[in-house]
Amino acid sequence: MNEKNLQVVLASRPAAAAGESDFRFVEAAVPDLREGDFLVRVDWLSLDPYMRGRMNEGKSYAARVELGEVMVGGAVGTVVSSRHGGFAEGDKVLGSFGWQRFAVSDGKGVMKLPDPRLPETVWLGAAGMPGITAWMGLGQVGSPRPGETVVVSAASGAVGSVAGQLAKIAGCRAVGIAGGAAKCEHAVKALGFDECIDYKAGPIDAALKAAAPGGVDVYFDNVGGAILDAVLRRVNTGARIPLCGLIAGYDGADIPIRNVFSLLVNRVRLQGFIVSDRMDLWPAAMRELAGHVAAGRIRYHETVAHGLENAPRAFLGMLRGENLGKQLVKVS
């Protein structure tokens, strides 16, 4: 194959906020296929907050990206050549192909898109890893019951938007927290949240009390920090908190919990979870989520950057909250 493979590699580890200088573009030859391999042209790249943690050197729940390595990332692509019995030219596939135009795979961790009736990108968003994260955290940790109040931070994002809609499907009152009036309007009018609090408009204590007058039964936390602290002042006895992310501290900021006594006084169950720990649940989650999307019970929005060369800028913008819904890169 004569075409070169453009790759985005990690150039340096950010000391605080990540910047475009932490990435480097390289061109590499597309390797020849060995028996049992196939070549994927990456069509769509998923950009997700967890990638920021992979840029750091410290211990985390998954291996860091080493300097000079291709940035990790889920993607949807097309098989362009194959020496693998299970994958043929033209197959649409989902896998962790990374920030590059082409990827060679032996098939491990790769699946063919399960339902061709749905858009390819849904398997990177509402019916893919972000949706499964919402499904697992809310269902396995939050255990919402009809009539309860579920609060979701980062409510307009890829994970939070699905978590709030699953709460509504479960018969709960869904209150979102998002940054900016436009995102809150989207959460209520497009996604069906009952209310949404704009944390950029000022301290959220009064707004949270008005939106959840009976207290908070489940808090799906994507951010940590001051928002988690504010919610802890409103939790009911026996509340559950699926801890999905701590984006408030991804750039090295302190994220203290001052209202820690609320955890004890209200007998709160706060549990961190990692979606990749329960791969056995993914098939059931994908089937259920795809069914909800097909039936219109789960709606989603995508923000798309065009061209792999714009991936670093789009990624950094996502970390600053500039995207609405799922952040994607149209690679090919």
Image: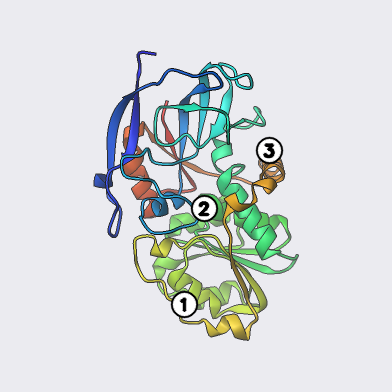
What residue is rendered at 73% in x and 61% in y?
171
Q: Position of residue 88 (x, y in %)?
A: 59, 17
Q: Quadrant of the C terminus?
A: top left
- Residue where numbered disc 1 is placed: 257
Give the amino acid type for the residue marked by disc 1 in the picture.
Ile
Q: Is residue 314 left or right of residue 43?
A: left
Q: Residues within 10 Å of mark 3 (few under 14, many from 20)?
A: few
**From where the camera sits, is residue 165 visible?**
no
For the point 57% across and 45% down, the residue is 129
Q: Quick check: can you spot residue 17?
A: yes
Q: CA distance from mark 1 to mark 2?
A: 29 Å
Q: Residue furthest right?
A: 146
Q: Label 3 to label 2, Cα distance in Å? A: 20 Å
Identity of the amino acid at label 3?
Answer: Ala
Q: Where residue 311 sits: x, y (%)?
A: 36, 39
Q: Residue at x 58, y 21 (%)?
A: 91
Determine the secondary structure under disc 1: loop
Give the mark nearer the N terminus: 3 vs 1.
1
The mark closer to the camera, 3 or 1, is: 1
Precedes in sequence: disc 3 or disc 2 = 2
| Residue at numbered disc 2 | 186
Numbered mark located on residue 294 in the image: 3
Q: Amino acid at mark 2?
A: His
Residue 74, position as x, y percentages in the image: 50, 39
